[in-house]
């Protein structure tokens, strides 16, 4: 909201020497946000004066252009030129070349004399052009920076001015005024007006505020029997709220449409960011800016019958004032006459009833439309307007008849119109609900010991009706503050008006025993561990296709029940993910397409499982009403299970190539390492076995489970056909773990093993077993059989071929033995090795490879 200071001074005690910056600094005290300062004089400097054309001689030159060689008087006849400077003629008559032709001898114009600066740092000087020394410029509206009209120069008589020759044109046109721009937050719609800003300024300087609306209200006539017929018929209110609850109409006849808008009014509109159109339109915009009530004017002679406010019907169309034909939606609130829609309520009027140069009878509309209805219509048609901005934030429902009266008064005064005396005011508004405010509540909530006098004074200042009770106050908010709904809102007003600087700066004391929960701390350890290992954490969208869920979330590729979005951002991805891998793979592909080759990415996120979810077909509970226990049970039953999963994808090499560095291609073992790192971070030992998943390589896939046999994930190399189909790098690997299940097996405490100070004894053994015996099972048997002296046992080779019987394989295992209290002898290590071999022979028929 741009606030011209000259306008603000009419309603608030702003010092004459106060700048726009001073006004903004004052308004910040009461919670308004400063935005910008607009000062036309920053880009304009004199001498820029009123001149009168004494003569003009047309000259056609060799380039085909006809210009006027003009003599322009810039000081009154008989007076001396007091301005000095290079190019300023002491006689008071300047010779000026002008290419415009829309003026005549005797016209008074705006003259920029040598030394002046126009917007765009355009400096005026005396220079030779078209065979003459042109000492100045006869300025157009656009050259002065006060409009877009560049068809010709500004003739002052055409805007209703007859100033003295030589007078300051900047002062005449209001260009010394400045505006403070305030950012109006959605809850402070009343501040979208000079009236609202003036009220806040008075709050800030603790000065009484005289409400212009309250002063004008007693002169507003009551509705008359011959008032213009208006019907409100909203048969589809949004959330039970009618789209319109007040509609005031006045009729003014006999206006002169050719009367120019007074320069003072044009100047204020321009500084407020609104361009001048015509006097009736300018008056309506002026009142909107002044009071905050949007006004619409109709050419009354183009209306057919009375006005009806209703929802649009399917197939109806309306050409709005911007010249665009719009197809209306059933949710649009429209203003109609007998011919059909003539305006989008609260957004923009229709072209068929536009006030034009031939209009002599004007119908003035001041209405109060619902915030949600206007906001939806403006967004649906991509049609923001000054009116919709105000309606979306809430307009004072008691303001309409007063604002209409103000427009009538201005049209009578400035356009020569006559008030017909026909008054319509359809009023369906309700009185704001009273709020009970306990006496000690403001002090308890803010931490400042507000006296009862301060509380009551603050609430009265904002316009509320305050009644003292035994326990505090009963407060009825003013009609222009729809944001005041409960006692917390009232406390905020008390704190704001008394001064935010009075609120003490005390840091709250952190309560003991808080911090991360056990589960949160465990998730943090997992994420930190993987990041420390060189993986990069990413976040992907949880939206996927049904095919993605079937591919990644089902080991066999069968259909996976999925949660479908009611309003997906893409019809190609209408489901919520049942696996984290689809989004992670897309991130991998996107980064590869941008030149990144060596990638190790991981993500921790929720998946959404539709199994067992009760379909919720009942209506959602209304806003502002707490659901009952049965409704909560129904809603909870409709919420899908959302466990967390950890997934990672790996492609490329483990390190970039360089001197003395030979990169190694990432493979299935790296994916398995990621799983084991995550498990060890929460003290869980994983069991690894041969697995299968139709999205993974049939021979390079591991099934991951806990020690008690709970399957929690899969790791390995992706299927070659899938890699080719999706354009992934060869040998891309992946892992996915059910992190929620993994955390359920988290150890209560991880105890560090005692480190022995004695040397280890190492021995290897190669065992020949049936080819279908998993190496992991053989390794587990060897570990059990070796006894307590065994420190580690790892498979380092698996071989099948020459020297090994058909259907058999050789598994080589490295064994390391160590005792905590002594140095082992070779016999002790050998005996432990033999015990391990014996266990393998009993359980798997293993024989030592010869």
Image: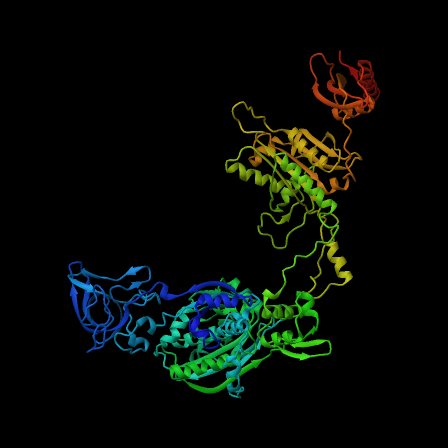
Left-right relation of 25 to 453: left
Dividing the picture into quadrants, the one containing residue 143 is bottom left
Q: Nearer the viewer, residue 150 or 621?
A: 150
Residue 839: x and y in percent read 83, 21
In the image, residue 263 sits, relative to residue 610, either above or below, namely: below
Residue 273: x and y in percent read 42, 67
* Residue appearing at x 58%, y 76% in the figure: 461
In the image, residue 810 sits, relative to residue 573, either above or below, namely: above
Quadrant of the rendering where the C terminus is positioned: top right
Dividing the picture into quadrants, the one containing residue 648 is top right
Residue 809: x and y in percent read 73, 18
Q: Nearer the viewer, residue 828 or 344?
A: 828
Left-right relation of 418 to 546: left
Q: Nearer the viewer, residue 402 or 517?
A: 517
Q: How many marks?
A: 0
Residue 438: x and y in percent read 71, 73
* Residue appearing at x 74%, y 55% in the figure: 636
Left-right relation of 59 to 398: left
- Residue 312 seen in this snapshot: no
Q: Nearer the viewer, residue 843 or 534?
A: 534
- Residue 380 seen in this snapshot: yes
Name the colour scheme: rainbow
Left-right relation of 609 to 271: right
């Amino acid at each position: 909201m741009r606030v011209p200071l000259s306008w603000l001074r009419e309603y608030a005690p702003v010092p004459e020497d106060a700048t726009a910056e001073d006004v903004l600094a004052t308004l910040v005290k009461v919670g308004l946000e400063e935005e910008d300062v607009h000062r036309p004089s920053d880009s304009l400097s004199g001498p820029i004066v009123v001149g009168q054309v004494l003569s003009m001689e047309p000259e056609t030159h060799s380039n085909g252009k006809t210009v006027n060689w003009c003599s322009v008087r810039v000081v009154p006849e008989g007076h001396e030129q007091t301005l000095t400077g290079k190019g300023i003629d002491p006689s008071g008559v300047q010779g000026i070349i002008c290419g415009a032709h829309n003026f005549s001898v005797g016209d008074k114009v705006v003259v920029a004399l040598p030394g002046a600066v126009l917007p765009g740092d355009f400096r005026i000087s005396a220079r030779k052009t078209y065979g003459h020394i042109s000492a100045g410029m006869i300025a157009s509206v656009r050259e002065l920076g006060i409009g877009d009209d560049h068809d010709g120069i500004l003739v002052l008589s055409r805007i209703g001015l007859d100033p003295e020759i030589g007078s300051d044109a900047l002062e005449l046109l209001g260009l010394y005024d400045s505006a403070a721009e305030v950012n109006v937050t959605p809850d402070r719609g009343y501040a979208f007006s000079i009236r609202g800003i003036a009220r806040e300024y008075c709050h800030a300087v603790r000065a009484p505020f005289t409400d212009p609306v309250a002063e004008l209200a007693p002169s507003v006539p009551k509705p008359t029997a011959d008032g213009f017929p208006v019907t409100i018929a909203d048969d589809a209110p949004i959330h039970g709220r009618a789209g319109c609850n007040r509609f005031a109409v006045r009729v003014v006849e006999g206006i002169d449409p050719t009367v120019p808008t007074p320069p003072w009014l044009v100047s204020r509109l321009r500084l407020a960011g609104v361009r001048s159109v015509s006097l009736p339109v300018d008056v309506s915009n002026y009142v909107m800016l002044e009071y905050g009530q949007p006004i619409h004017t109709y050419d009354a002679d183009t209306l057919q019958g009375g006005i009806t406010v209703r929802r649009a019907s399917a197939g109806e169309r309306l050409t709005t004032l911007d010249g665009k034909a719009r197809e209306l939606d059933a949710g649009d609130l429209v203003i109609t006459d007998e011919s059909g829609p003539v305006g989008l309520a609260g957004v923009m009027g229709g072209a068929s009833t536009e006030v034009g140069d031939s209009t002599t009878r004007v119908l003035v509309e001041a209405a109060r439309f619902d915030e949600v209805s206007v906001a939806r219509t403006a967004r649906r048609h991509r049609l923001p307007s000054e009116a919709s901005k105000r309606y979306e934030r809430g307009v004072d429902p008691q303001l309409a008849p007063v604002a209409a009266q103000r427009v009538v008064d201005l049209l009578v005064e400035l356009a020569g119109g006559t008030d017909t005396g026909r008054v319509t005011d359809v009023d369906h508004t309700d009185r704001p609900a009273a709020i009970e405010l306990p006496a000690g509540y403001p002090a308890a909530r803010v931490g400042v010991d507000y006296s009862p006098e301060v509380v009551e004074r603050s609430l009265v200042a904002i316009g509320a009706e305050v009644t003292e009770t035994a326990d505090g106050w009963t407060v009825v908010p003013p009609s222009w503050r729809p944001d005041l709904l409960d006692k917390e809102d009232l406390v905020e007003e008390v704190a704001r008006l008394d001064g935010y600087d009075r609120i003490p700066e005390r840091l709250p004391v952190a309560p003991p025993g808080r911090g991360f929960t056990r589960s949160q701390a465990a998730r943090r350890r997992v994420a930190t561990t993987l990041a420390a290992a060189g993986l990069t954490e990413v976040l992907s969208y949880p939206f996927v296709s049904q095919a993605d869920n079937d591919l990644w979330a089902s080991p066999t590729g069968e259909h996976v029940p999925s949660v479908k979005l009611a309003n997906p951002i893409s019809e190609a991805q209408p489901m919520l993910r049942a696996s984290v891998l689809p989004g992670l793979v897309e991130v991998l592909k996107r980064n590869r397409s941008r030149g990144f080759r060596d990638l190790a990415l991981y993500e921790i996120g929720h998946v959404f499982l539709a199994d067992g979810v009760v379909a919720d077909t009942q209506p959602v509970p209304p806003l502002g009403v707490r659901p009952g226990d049965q409704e909560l049970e129904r809603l909870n039953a409709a919420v899908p299970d959302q466990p967390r999963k950890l997934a990672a994808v790996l492609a490329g090499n483990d390190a970039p190539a360089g001197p003395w560095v030979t990169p190694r291609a990432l493979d299935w073992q790296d994916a398995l390492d990621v799983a084991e790192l995550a498990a060890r971070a929460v003290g869980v030992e994983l069991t690894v076995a041969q697995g299968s998943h139709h999205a993974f390589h049939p021979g390079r896939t591991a099934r991951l489970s806990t020690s008690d046999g709970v399957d929690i994930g899969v790791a390995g190399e992706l299927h070659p056909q899938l890699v080719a189909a999706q354009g992934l790098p060869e040998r891309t690997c992946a892992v996915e773990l059910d992190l929620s299940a993994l955390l359920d097996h988290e150890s209560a405490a991880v105890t560090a093993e005692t480190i022995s100070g004695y040397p280890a004894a190492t021995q290897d053994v190669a065992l020949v077993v049936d080819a279908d015996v998993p190496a992991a099972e053989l390794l587990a048997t060897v570990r059990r059989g070796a006894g307590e002296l065994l420190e580690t046992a790892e498979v380092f080779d698996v071989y099948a071929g020459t020297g090994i019987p058909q259907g058999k394989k050789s598994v080589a295992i490295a064994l390391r033995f160590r005792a905590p209290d002594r140095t082992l002898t070779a016999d002790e290590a050998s005996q432990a090795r033999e015990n391990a071999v014996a266990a393998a022979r009993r359980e798997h028929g293993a024989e030592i490879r010869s």
